[in-house]
Image (cartoon, helix red, strand yellow):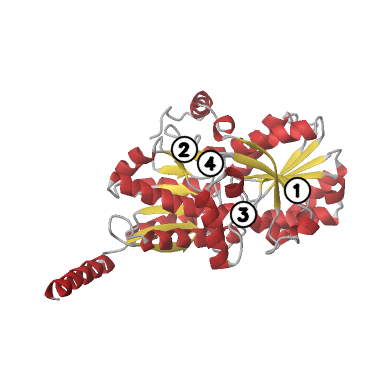
Amino acid sequence: MNRLTATLALWAGITACAQAAEPITLGLNYPRTGPYKEEGLAQMRGALLAIDEINAKGGVLGRPLRLSSQDTASRPAKAVKNVDKLAAEGAAMLFGGASSAVAIAAGKRARERGLLYFGTLTYSNDTTGKDGQRYLFRECNSAWMSAKVLGQYLSEKLPNKNYFYVTADYTWGTTSESSLRQTTGTEDVARHPGLKVPFPGARLADYQNALTQAAQSKAEVLVLVLFGEDLVRAMRVAEDLGLTQRMQIVAPNLTQAIVEQAGPSLMAGVLGTEPWTWHVPEREGSEAGKAFVRDFTARYEVYPSSSAASAYSIVRQWADAVGRAKSLDSEALIKTLEGHSYRLLKGEQQWRAFDHQNVQSVYAVKVKPRAEVMKDALRQDYFEIVHHLDGAQAAPSLAEWQAERRAANQPSTLQ
């Protein structure tokens, strides 16, 4: 009896020590407001689910994780200030965002503070290209990877068509447009014209002007290089002008939240890309991915989006790297992450060593007709996967990456 009492007391003491261990803070730098706020909400939800799962298994290095967050409003200057706030709280690493300008600017500041920064939705080629650096990792695909899979599909299904581009005037928009022009052979701006709209802060008049010019052109394919609420607003203008009926509309990067906001009737038939949809785990036989879909759906009563999956994966991957390195030190974690291959929510992925790009499959998707969407229990079965490329086929090669760096007068290795 005394031995049992002593054992129980020892166990209670160990448990109390574990509960009293100082939490490790993770800093989420994400858009709680602004045009990308729905993508931000999904990131918050994915991150919290990952943290709860990790804490239920004892935390990281015997310490629980906690999340602290700051709103970027998709503005780089605000995101940089947030890095300082989160660093002052003692954050061990930073992640998040739905703007490449935010990820690049915040990543640079994080490096100055000695912190790793993991970009969630940052599709600009520049993030891991000319602006790539050792303390910045990108979980999602690049604009080039999106353009590669989308360009293959468009070239096969809609060859020799006239294009018109409407593009958000910042790093994601410009690199996405240039990449898609290359992969579709639409570099001739006389035949395939385009217009830029401000970001952030585009007005309704900006979309009306650009899309009126698209309507007056000979275009058969309308490429809206816009994201979040900006894409939703442009789609409504396009519908008013009759363009959704006349043209094939392409949006290089789609998300579940965009279709949700605009409505499946308006978005039906739009082509784009996604790095992940909630159907992918079933498609690729990922048991962990299926569990994520099941648990996320039960918790939030919505299917997880690629935004949620990205934040969830980053937290899980960072925790895994800490466990393998047995350290929170950024330099130790860089060495542990570089070249690391894993399977989590889909097939094989890798944190590529030379540019810190996450190499993974990318999917060309088409928004289903509303009648198909409504057959689903949650009415959120938005995407049909129409084409895909493995990460190794989609990602730029080392030689291509080095050429990009040389053109920008950047070192041929990450600094």
On screen, residue 318 versus residue 394, left or right, reads left
Q: Is residue 64 above or below residue 206?
A: below
Q: Earlier in the sequence, mark 3 or mark 1?
A: 3
- Quarter of the figure with the N terminus: bottom left
Mark in the foreground, 3 or 4: 4
- The image position of residue 65, as x and y in percent, is 36, 61
Q: Amino acid at mark 2?
A: Gln
The image shows residue 397, relative to residue 224, as above or below, that is: above
Q: Amino acid at mark 1?
A: Val
- In the picture, measured across the screen, residue 381 lies left or right of residue 159, that is left
398 and 296: which is toward the camera: 296
Residue indicated by mark 4: 347
**Kind of residue at badge 3:** Pro
Nearest to N terminus: mark 1 or mark 4 = 1
Per the model, the C-alpha gap separating discs 1 and 2 is: 30 Å
Whether pointer 1 and pointer 4 mark residues with C-beta atoms closer than 8 Å, the reply is no
Residue at mark 1: 270
Residue on which disc 2 sits: 350
The answer to whether the residues at label 1 and label 2 have Cβ atoms under 8 Å apart is no
SS under mark 1: loop
